[in-house]
Image: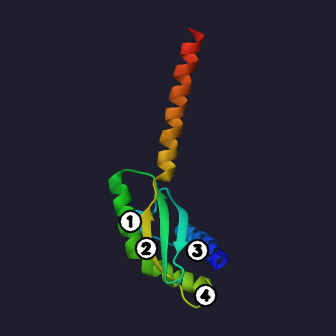
């Protein structure tokens, strides 16, 4: 059962990413957005889609509203593209792990730069 969920997660992630790239015309969803993860419930009725959105907090809120509005369209498109008995209901969540990672890398570079300066003095 875990393998089936893992396959479904990766399939939905790939297909939603492709739909966002080629099909969705909502201006709120045209920024730098990437699907970072999908988590399908064990009964395959619900799917949490985690997206990374680059921009301000207002941009993120607008994009999440756009995803909420487009969830029915995306579900219909998935149903036509995939041979599934039931396409799960999609709910979208903001994933800020990429931004946190970038901030962490910047902090590490600052620490390395300051320790290099103190060693050379």
Of 98 and 76, nearer the camera is: 98
Q: Which residue corresponds to mark 4?
A: 84
Q: Is residue 69 above or below residue 106?
A: below
Which mark, residue 12?
3
Q: CA distance from mark 2 to mark 3?
A: 12 Å
Question: On the picture, is 63 further left or further right than 35?
Answer: left
**Mark nearer the viewer, 1 or 4:** 4
Of labels 1 and 2, earlier in sequence is: 1
Q: Tell me the CA gap for discs 1 and 4.
A: 26 Å
Instruction: State the residue lying farthest toward the top.
Output: 121
Q: Which mark is residue 91?
A: 2
| In front of the other: 29 or 6 | 6
Residue at the image position 47 percent from the left and 46 percent from the top: 100
Mark 1 or mark 4, earlier in chain: 1
Residue 118 image offset from top left, x and y in percent: 54, 14
Q: Are marks 1 and 4 in contact (CB under 8 Å)?
A: no
Q: Residues within 10 Å of mark 3 (few under 14, many from 20)?
A: many
Q: Which residue lies under the disc numbered 1?
A: 64
- Going 46% across and 70% down the picture, which residue do you hit? 25
Of the residues under marks 3 and 4, which one precedes in the sequence? 3
Report the Cα–Cα distance between label 1 and label 2.
10 Å
* Res 117 quadrant in image: top right
Q: Residue at x 56, y 26 (%)?
A: 112
Q: Earlier in the sequence, mark 2 or mark 4?
A: 4
Q: Earlier in the sequence, mark 2 or mark 3?
A: 3
Please tell me whether mark 1 or mark 2 is closer to you in this view: 2
SS label for mark 2:
strand
Q: How is the image coloured?
A: rainbow
SS under mark 1 = helix
Q: Quadrant of the N terminus?
A: bottom right
**Circle count:** 4
Q: Do labels 2 and 3 touch, CB within 8 Å?
A: no
């Amino acid at each position: 059962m875990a393998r089936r969920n893992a396959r479904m997660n990766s399939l939905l992630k790939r297909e939603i990413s492709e739909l966002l790239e080629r099909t969705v015309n909502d201006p709120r969803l045209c920024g730098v957005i990437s699907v970072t993860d999908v988590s399908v419930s064990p009964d395959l009725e619900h799917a949490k889609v985690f997206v990374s959105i680059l921009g301000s907090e207002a941009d993120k809120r607008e994009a999440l509203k756009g995803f909420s509005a487009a969830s029915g369209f995306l579900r219909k498109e998935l149903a036509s593209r995939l041979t599934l008995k039931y396409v799960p209901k999609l709910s979208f969540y903001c994933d800020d792990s990429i931004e946190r990672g970038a901030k962490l890398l910047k902090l590490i570079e600052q620490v390395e730069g300051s320790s290099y300066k103190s060693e050379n003095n």
